[in-house]
Image: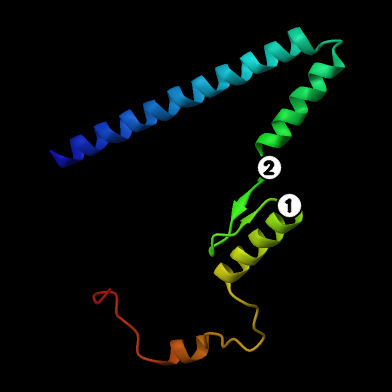
Amino acid sequence: MEATKTDKVKKLTEEVIYWNEMEENMMMQRTEIDWIRLGDGNNAFFHAYLKTKQNSKRMNVIQKADGTILTSQKDVAQEVIDFYGKLMGQDSGNLQHIDIEALRSGSQLTMDQR
């Protein structure tokens, strides 16, 4: 009975994803139609369209962990680098690696134990 419910949920999830993609494609086509209709021969519209698209992907303001708000593009970029640098850790040339030979020579699980 559970497998049937799981299959139904999977099928419905795939259907939702399909219709979301269809809606996204339709919206993209509408945008292209507007650009063709309004942008053809209208450089001001074309440049405004590109500027809007670029600005929507830009981080203009960011708040640091201590609450400080950064607005300059240089400060925002540096904070992003610092934040993700701390998450990833520091590069260390003396990290120990796994000794594959030691693993292979030690006792190992049999197929039945796995």
- The correct choice, above or below, for 53 with respect to 28 in the image is below
Instruction: Locate the C terminus and report the quarter of the image it occupies.
Output: bottom left
Q: Amino acid at mark 1?
A: Ser
Residue at 24% from the left image edge and 75% from the top image edge: 112
Q: Which mark is residue 9?
A: none
Q: Position of residue 29 (x, y in %)?
A: 63, 16
Q: Amino acid at mark 2?
A: Arg
Disc 2 target residue: 58
In space, the residues marked 1 and 2 are separated at their CA atoms by: 12 Å
* Quadrant into which the N terminus falls: top left
Q: What residue sits 43% from the left and 30% below the top?
A: 17
Dividing the picture into quarters, in which one does residue 111 lie? bottom left
Count the labels in the image: 2
User: Label 1 neighbourhood size at 10 Å, few (<14), some (14-19), many (20+)?
Assistant: few
Identity of the residue drawn at 67% across and 85% down:
93
On residue 72, the disc is 1
Q: Position of residue 49 (x, y in %)?
A: 74, 23
At 62% from the left and 77% from the top, the residue drawn is: 90
- Which x, y percent locates residue 31? 65, 17
